[in-house]
Amino acid sequence: METSYNPNEQALALHGERVDEETRQVQARLLNILKAIDRVCREHHLTYYLLCGTMLGAVRHGGFIPWDDDADVGMPREDYEILLAHADEWMPEGYEVVSGGRTEGYPYPFARVQEAGSTYRMHRSYDFVGGLPIDLFPLDGMIEDCGARRRHYARYKLWWKILYFTHTDPYKHGRGFRSMITLLLRRLFKPAYVHGKLDQVRRQWRIADSPLLADHDYRPEKGAMPKEWYGEPVPVKFEDCMLMGVSKPEAYLTHLYGNYMEIPSEIPPRNYRFLDLNKPWREYVAEQKK
């Protein structure tokens, strides 16, 4: 007798110890942020897509991958910039958009939509503290020429590395040569300048003139794919609601993950080193300064 495939049951059987109450609470809050993004984009006629593991979860699990504690959304560059420009007036109370161009000390080359009422710190050597976030990526044009694409990503990776050094603890790895390099780069490059260079590199090719779209993953063979795979956003079931996914999910997910319906035998560690879902991050920062 043939049995039906239930990816959630299989995932829970393998990794049930990670699907604890805190993970469920995190996912519930992330879902609220996703709904807020969806509502703002619908009201203002902006295009967005669930990306990467969030799109995978929608297809394979009908929502979050059971152990996931983050979510990713992508927007075409023009719509991304419109949202950032109007975030303060458009986002519902309790949510805010942070990015390199608008938030002091922000260390990432993409924006985030975060809760104001929680505190969240990633597993990285940054001092930046914010609320529980969803990563918001701009999607830019990309050409097919492999050599030009590799050179493009090499420049992007260089500026991303410089951004890392301008925000990381210079003494994380001791007081030797590496800390000297970090201190020198901090002296030479202001974060706002580096964020601007990253945006300049990403904008090299316009979407309208490009056969590919890029989310600017470090890996050019993964971060760029045919524009039609994104296409017009398609509604996809995600937990208790319908959100917008890529037009060709099978091609998109196969490109990123290969056999994407297979449940992995190992799962990554949590994305965060500190989380308090009940303390506003501004209160946390104020307490740390005392």
Image: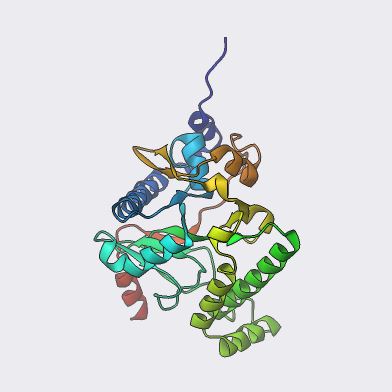
Q: Residue at x 32, y 67 (%)?
A: 86
Asked if 208 appears above or below 125 in the picture, the reply is above
Task: Work out which residue is located at the far top of the displayed protein and give it.
Answer: 1
Is any part of residue 69 visible from this angle? no
Q: Residue at x 28, y 53 (%)?
A: 43
Q: Which quarter of the figure is the C terminus placed in?
A: bottom left
Q: Residue at x 60, y 58 (%)?
A: 210
Q: Is residue 96 left or right of residue 248?
A: left
Residue 59: image location, x then y, percent: 50, 36
Q: Is residue 87 left or right of residue 100?
A: left
Q: Which quarter of the figure is the N terminus placed in?
A: top right
Q: Residue at x 41, y 53 (%)?
A: 47
Is any part of residue 128 visible from this angle? yes
- Quarter of the image where one finds residue 248: top right
- The chosen color scheme is rainbow
Residue 253: image location, x then y, percent: 58, 42
Asked if 287 appears above or below 235 in the picture, the reply is below
Residue 19: image location, x then y, percent: 46, 41
- Quarter of the image where one finds residue 207: bottom right
Task: Work out which residue is located at the far front of the displayed protein and give it.
Answer: 209
Asked if 277 appears above or below 288 in the picture, the reply is above
Task: Report the number of discs.
Answer: 0
Task: Work out which residue is located at the far right of the displayed protein and give it.
Answer: 147
Compare residues 54 and 39 and report the one nearer the observer. Answer: 39
Compare residues 151 and 269 and report the one nearer the observer. Answer: 151
Residue 217: image location, x then y, percent: 60, 59
